[in-house]
Amino acid sequence: MRYIFGFTLFGLLVMFGVAWLGSSRSRPPPDVMFLASDLYFTVGGQHIVLPAVALRQPDHVFDLAPARRESPKDRLRAQAQNPAAPMPTDSIDVSIRAYESYGEHFGSRDICPLLTRAWARTQCRGQRGGLLGRLPEKFDLLDRSKLDRLKSHVTVGGETRYDQVKDMAFHPGSPEIGCDRQSHFCTAVVEALPGLLAVWTVWPDEKTGRTADQMAQIQGAATVPFVQRAIGPVEDPTLANAE
């Protein structure tokens, strides 16, 4: 029986040593082959494919089932590397950044040519232009029926993401925001696929003068096709260079 409920996925990676924050000198070289490998999940009934290196540390706690002695890395290998049997989970924490920039000691540049998807290879080398350049640097993919998981996500202003989004209508492809009363930060949400929400933080852009809502519209307009065309069961490789 699989114990698959109540955790987010980068937390597992942190537990086996793929924690990119802090000094890298005390850590052994990373498992580049694993970091570059595709992991297969179902979230909200949708199939999602991401390289392990694109999973990030969650901002909230998670629970692992007891009495499981295998390492989290082995668990992901056993449960998330078979495209015919993707691993069910409530949410995934996604990082969009130059994956080669995590440090020379980690040999991160070795990851880039091993990545299977065009968007990931482009992103790995820091070539963020066009649509990829408009994505938020981190966002969560969340099962719409598991909205109460956001009760444990505390915002900069001391509120919860759940309180900010619980009354939203979630129109497909149309981002909405809920904002802190005590800060300029807001929670943006868009239904990227039926039953699958993308959730991220937005704020006003002082350089351009755009409001938080305008930033959510720009980033949401990139996030929806990214989810639909880049990280589903089959990639549309043209998206990597889409404007």
Image (cartoon, helix red, strand yellow):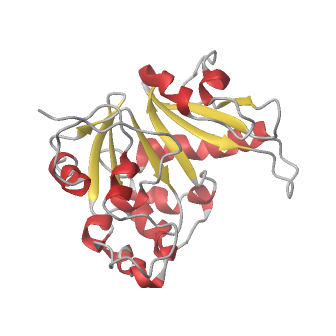
Q: Residue at x 56, y 51 (%)?
A: 138
- Asked if residue 49 is positioned above or below residue 30 in the image, the reply reads above
| Quarter of image, res 156 | top right
Q: Residue 196 vs residue 187: left or right?
A: left
**Can I make out residue 72 in this image?**
yes
| Quarter of image, res 174 | top right
Q: Residue at x 36, y 46 (%)?
A: 9
Q: Residue 20 vs residue 73: left or right?
A: right
Q: Among all residues in the image, which is located at the extreme left?
A: 1
Q: Nearer the viewer, residue 149 or 171?
A: 149
**Can I make out residue 51 in this image?**
no
Quadrant in which the N terminus is drawn: top left
Whole-percent x and y of residue 157?
Answer: 75, 36
Whole-percent x and y of residue 50?
Answer: 35, 53
Q: Residue at x 18, y 45 (%)?
A: 79
Whole-percent x and y of residue 72?
Answer: 25, 52
Quadrant in which the C terminus is drawn: bottom right
Q: Residue 165 vs residue 63: left or right?
A: right
